[in-house]
Image (cartoon, rainbow, N blue to C red):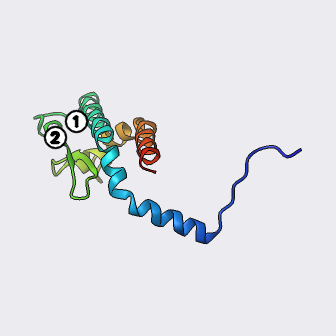
Amino acid sequence: MKKGVKMSFDSAELARLSKMLKSKEKEINKEAYVGLANIALNIINQAKTTLKEVGAIKTGFLRDSGYVRKDKDDQVEAGFKATYAAFIEFGTTRMKGRPFLYPAMRDNEKEIERVISEAIKKIL
């Protein structure tokens, strides 16, 4: 008796699936937007807390530059506008990095996957 589950696809089936998903991309983005926007707000807030914990707040400018917005493709964009945010996140030749955004994103990966998966299921 064989155990497990097996699926196979040929390249034509994969191409058809890819084309179908591409045609539904805007609908999926729209369906997932609210959930992803809420997760993005959580990520920004978590990153702000981490900035304080790693001692990267002097004036509050970096912390206050956090944003979440919808881009032209109806996708959620989150980040920090301060020009030196990347220097804090990744470091420089003279300063060790103090990651604040990436850890927050990593902590929310499963929730992001769940929201996108639910949107795909609903649209398809």
Say which amino acid is labelled 2: Leu
Q: As drawn, is 96 to the left or to the right of 118?
A: left
Note whether residue 113 is visible. Answer: yes
Q: Which mark is residue 62?
A: 2
Q: As drawn, is 111 to the left or to the right of 64?
A: right
Q: Pinpoint residue 5: horizontal percent, then vertical percent.
A: 73, 47
Q: Quadrant of residue 33?
A: top left
Q: Nearer the viewer, residue 28 or 35?
A: 28
Point out the frontmost of discs 1 and 2: 2
Please rate how many residues cluster around mark 1, counting C-alpha atoms within 10 Å: few if below 14, some from 14 to 19, many from 20. Answer: some
Note whether residue 96 is visible. Answer: no
- Answer yes or no: do the residues labelled 1 and 2 have beta carbons within 8 Å? yes
Q: Nearer the viewer, residue 11 or 54?
A: 11
Q: Pinpoint residue 123: horizontal percent, then vertical percent.
A: 41, 49
Secondary element under disc 2, as helix, strand or loop, is helix
Residue most toward the bottom?
Answer: 12
Residue 63's place in the image compared with 96, above or below, is above
Please rate how many residues cluster around mark 2, counting C-alpha atoms within 10 Å: few if below 14, some from 14 to 19, many from 20. Answer: some
Say which amino acid is labelled 1: Ala
Residue in the picture at 25% in, 35% down: 41
- Would you name the residue on which mark 1 appears? 56
Residue in the picture at 33% in, 45% down: 31
